Amino acid sequence: MGTALIYDEEMTKYKLLWVDPACKIEVPERLTVSHEALVQSGLADRCISVPVRKATDSDILRVHSEEYLEGVKKTPYMTLEDLKEFTLQYGDVYFHQNIYHCAELAAGAALQLVDSVMTGQVRNGMALVRPPGHHSMRSAANGFCVFNNVAIAAQYAKQQYGVKRVLIVDWDVHHGQGVQYCFEDDPSVLYFSWHRYEHQNFWPKLRDSDFDSVGKEKGAGFNINVPWNKTKMQNSDYLSVFCHLLLPVAYEFCPDLVLVCAGFDSAIGDPEGEMCATPDIFAHLTHLLMNLAGGKVCAVLEGGYNLTSLAQSVCQTVQTLLGDPAPRPANLQGPCRSALESLHCARSTHRQYWPCLKHAADLPTSDISTKRFKLAEEKEDSDKEIVWPEPDKRFAPAVRAAVVLPDGVACPDGCHPFTLSEDLDPLIVNKLKEKFLKGADDRETLSTLSRLIALVDQMEKNEVCSGLALVPAITMATMCVIQHAASAPKNRVLVVCVGDWNVPKFTEDGKTLVMQFSNKVSEERASRYYIPLHLKKGFRDVSGFMQAVTGLLLPLGYQYDPSLVVLVRMSDSGLCDSVWQQLTGLLQGLAQGHTLVLMQDNEKDCVGPTGSSLLGDPAPSLGPLLAPLSEDVESVEKLRDKLKAEWKLLQNTAQDTGKDAGDCS
Ligand code: Q6P
Ligand code: ZN
C-alpha cells in the first residue's frame, strides 16, 4: 500500500498577466520547485505516480453553480481586457486563458487522489495543484482559487463511495471560507481551519472566520475555526491545537476519510503568513492524522509562497505519508499567550457539541486580547530576511521493526527477527548476571536481556527503527532496557506503562520520564518524573483513555522529546487491539519512531497487531467515541492542572500562563 503523488506540468501553464501586488506571489514556480524538490530528494520515485484527469462539469457542479461554471468556461476565449474585467468581480484572484483548463485538472487531481485511496490502490497521497481551491465559493472565485478542489473531492467521496464522515483539516494560514460555506449545515463533513486573523484585520477579513462560527443547523459544531490573532506562531502553538482540540474531536468524530487543505504559507519564511513554525512540523501534523480513517489521508496543495519553505514543507509531508519516521521536533517550549487564548476560545465554544471537550474552561472574560479592537500596530523590521536551517535529511533505517520472540511465537510479516551478530561484551553480560539474574544461571533470560540491550544500541545508532519483545519477566526486562538506554549521556527515555506494575523509583535526573496508566496505581507516589494516571474503569473507557493520550501523553511526550520510547504492556491490561494500535501509532511520532514495545509472554495474541503498528500500518478506527466517563476526565484534568506549569504543552487556556509568559511578538 503506497503513497500516490499527483502532478502535471500543465498546471504551471498560467500566470498573472498584469500588475497586481495582491496576486504577484501566486507563481507557476510554486509547483515546479515543490515537484523538483520531491524528485531531487528521491521521494517522487518512491511514490506511485497517478495521472491527473479533468473534473467533469457534473463534478464541478457538486459544489459550484451553473452560472459560475458557465462564466469560467468563457475565459479561455477572452481577450486580455475581458480577462481583467472578468477578474474584477472577484477578490484577490486573476484569470488567464489557460486557468479554466488548469482548474479542471486541479479539481480532477483531487478526485484522482480520492479514487486511488478509496479503491485501495494506495494508502494515502498528495496532489500538487494550481490553482488552489479553499477560498472559492459556490458562485465566486477568490484568493487565487477558481474551483474548490477539496470541497469537490469531499462531495465526490460522499456521493461516489458512500463515505459517511469526512474530516477536512485546513492548515493553510488563510481561512478556507469557501470550504466553510460549502459544508456549514452538513454534519457529515467536519471542517477544521486555523488561520491568521488579527481580530478580523487580516485577509479575507471575515467575521465568519472567528472561533464562534461553528456551523449551522444540523451542522452546528462541525465547523471549527482557530483564529490566530498574532503572527509568529511556532511549532508549539500548532501542536497544542492539534493535541487539545483537533485530535480529540477527530477521534470522537471518527472520519472515514481525511482531506487536508495542505497550504504551507503557515510555515516560516512565508510572506503572507509571517508565522514561525518550521517545515518539519508538517511531518508531525501529517503523522498525527495518519491513524485516523484507517490511514486514508489525501493532501491537496493550497497556498505557500516562500519557495524554499514551501518545497521543504511539501517534502516533509510526502516523506511522512510514505511512512518514514518523523524527525525529532524542534523547540517546543510551549504555546504563546495569544495562541492559548485562541485555543481556549475555540475549546469553550465547542464544548457544547463535543463530549470530549465537555470539561473545557468557560470562555475567558474581560482582560484578554480576544476583544475585537485593532491592536496598536507593532512596527518592526518586517523586511529583515528570515532564515532557518534546512531540515535534516530523514532516512528510514534498513530494519523497520525488529522482534525478540520466544521459540514457537511466529514473527509477524514484515518484521525482522532480531539475533545477535556477535557476542555481547562480557562486561555487560557479567553486569546483567549480577544485577538482574542475581547469580542464577538462566541462559534463556540472559539471552533475551542481551538481545534487548543490543537492540537498544542498534536503535540508538539508527540501524533499527523500532522493536518488539515478548519477555518472560517483563519488569526485569523493562528495568534492564531503561537502565541501559538512559546510561548514554544524551539519551532520554520516555517510559509509557500500560497496566498494573509497582514501578520502582528511578532517578529523578530527567533521564527517564515514566507515565503509567492503570486502574490500580496510586497518585501518592507521583514525582517529577513519575506520572501515574489512575483510570477508574481501567481501559474499558476508550474515550477517557484517548483523552489521556491526546491531552496528556502526547503533549508531555513532545515536550520531553525522548531519544527512545519504551512502551510497556503488562498482562491483563484489558486494552483492546485497536486502542493499543492507536497508542503505538501515535507514539511513533516521538524519538524518530524509536519505540521499543515490551510485553509479557502471555500476550502472544498482541504480537501481530503491535508488529503491524510498528511497521507503520495505520491503526483501525475506534468507531465514533461516546462521552468519556466524568471520573476519568476528572483524573486527566487534575493531572494536567498539576503538571501544566512545568510542562507548558499541557496548557490549553488563557489563564494557564502568567502575564509575562510566552508572548509571541
Ligand atoms: C491571499 C490574498 C494577498 C495579499 C497580498 C488556496 C491559497 C491561499 C490564498 C491566499 C490569498 N491576499 N499581500 O488559496 O489561501 O494561500
Ligand atoms: Zn493561504
Image (cartoon, helix red, strand yellow):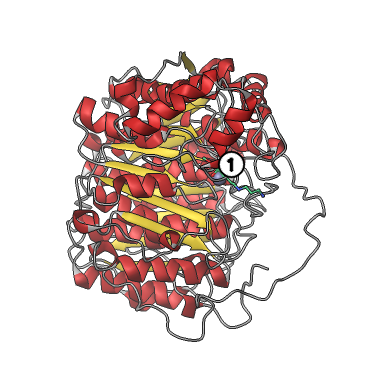
| Residue 441 percent location from the top left of the image | 41, 41
Query: Where is ligand 1, by quadrant?
Result: top right
Residue at image point 36% right, 24% down: 111
Specify the amino acid type for callout 1.
Pro
Q: Secondary structure at mark 1?
A: loop
Tell me the quarter of the picture where residue 78 sits.
top right
- The quadrant the C terminus occupies is bottom right
Residue under numbered circle 1: 327
User: 291 or 566: which is nearer to us?
Assistant: 291
Could you tell me which residue is drawn at 28 percent across and 29 percent down? 156
Q: Residue at x 47, y 48 (%)?
A: 565
Residue toward you, 189 or 48: 189
Residue 215 as seen in the image, left or right of residue 207 = left
- Residue 166, how many percent across, how many down? 29, 40
Q: In the image, 425: left or right of 307?
A: left
What crowding class fits label 1: few (fewer than 14 Cα within 10 Å), some (14-19), or many (20 or more)?
Answer: many
- Kindly identify the residue that appears in the image at 64 percent across and 31 percent down: 30
Kindly tell me whether residue 449 is visible in this rendering. Answer: no
Figure quadrant of the N terminus:
top left
